Amino acid sequence: MLDDSSTNETLLEVNNIEVIYNHVILVLKGVSLNVPKGGIIALLGGNGAGKTTTLKAISNLLNSERGEVTKGFVSYRGAEIHGADPADMVKRGVIQVMEGRHCFEHLTVEENLLTGAYTRSDSKADIQADLDMVYTYFPRLKERRKSQAGYTSGGEQQMVAIARALSGNVEMILMDEPFEGLSPTMIEELFESINDLRSEVSLLIIEHQLDLVLALADRAFILDRGVVSHEGPTRPLLEDLEFRKSKLWV
């Protein structure tokens, strides 16, 4: 778990990476970014800018889509992680929550959360303690813990996906469109849960709903056609509409 003394520590560093699909399609062209311990970082840009590709380059999920990092490197806690098995990435403390509310619909909410701990060698008591911790961030899931996940709402399924990642005792979660398609009520509830999570994990978030992600994040990196076109604190983007338009064309 995080402590205040380590918030300036860089957990993740993406250094000048290029990504090519099918050996010919250049998608990322020298992307660099970093995520500090305890930080929430927004990765912004239009459709096709390379945001999801960046997350998959970090989590090593590119191979399944015939993509590869051909230049640069990605390091986590100072160790290069390029080419690591995705399951090993989870053991190291990095997990990606994919777009689309992925959960095991035939399992209960709590059974879903417990699958997040499958890589852990901790005692049952430790796992139970972390499950209780997860419920403090997602109290709705505690209420629904015996419900079959497939019969919960879209917002609740999104919570399950994020909470399951947290159950793996990870230090960094990569989130792809966590608020997509949710009702205003569920967005508000999920926003508060994600905001509170900074005390437990570092977050790198892709989200098209700018007011939400800019209010959450400390810093933002903006991608434009595979290149980082802007990096800086989120406050100017949140408060200055003209500045936002100049950087995001919205």
Image (cartoon, grey):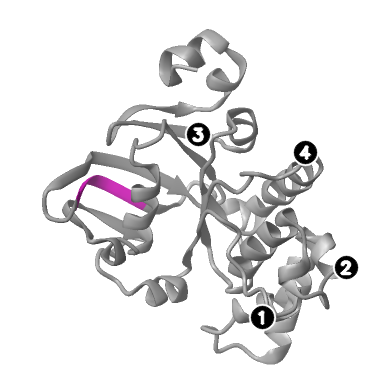
Of callouts 1 and 3, which one flags the residue occurring earlier in the amino acid sequence? 1
For discs 3 and 4, the disc positioned in front in the rendered view: 4
Towards the viewer: 85 or 61? 61
Residues at badges 3 and 2 in contact (C-beta under 8 Å)? no
Q: Counting residues from the N terminus, which is met first, the one under dot 4 or under dot 2?
A: 2
Horizontal relation, residue 200 to residue 223: left or right? right
- Image point (78%, 73%), residue name: 132
Spatial CA distance of label 1 from label 3 is 32 Å
Q: Amino acid at mark 3?
A: Arg
**Secondary-structure class at tag 4:** helix
Q: In which quarter of the view is residue 79 placed?
A: bottom left
How many angstroms separate mark 3 from mark 4 (CA)? 24 Å
Q: Main secondary structure of the magenta part?
A: strand
Query: The magenta stretch spans which residues?
Result: 13-20
Measured Cα–Cα span from mark 4 to mark 2: 20 Å
Give the CA distance from mark 2 to mark 1: 16 Å
Does label 2 or label 1 sit earlier along the sequence? 1
Question: Looking at the picture, how far across and down is residue 156, in whole percent?
Answer: 74, 59
The spot of residue 166 in percent (x, y) is 62, 66
Q: According to the image, label 2 marks what residue?
A: 143
User: In the shown orientation, is residue 248 left or right of residue 50?
Assistant: right
Q: Are marks 2 and 1 in contact (CB under 8 Å)?
A: no
- Crowding around mark 2 (Cα neighbors within 10 Å: few <14, some 14 to 19, many 20+) is few
Give me the residue at 29% from left, 71% from top.
84
Q: Which mark is residue 219?
A: 3
Q: Which mark is residue 114?
A: 1
Picture quadrant where residue 216 is located: top right
Above or below residue 130? Residue 238 is above
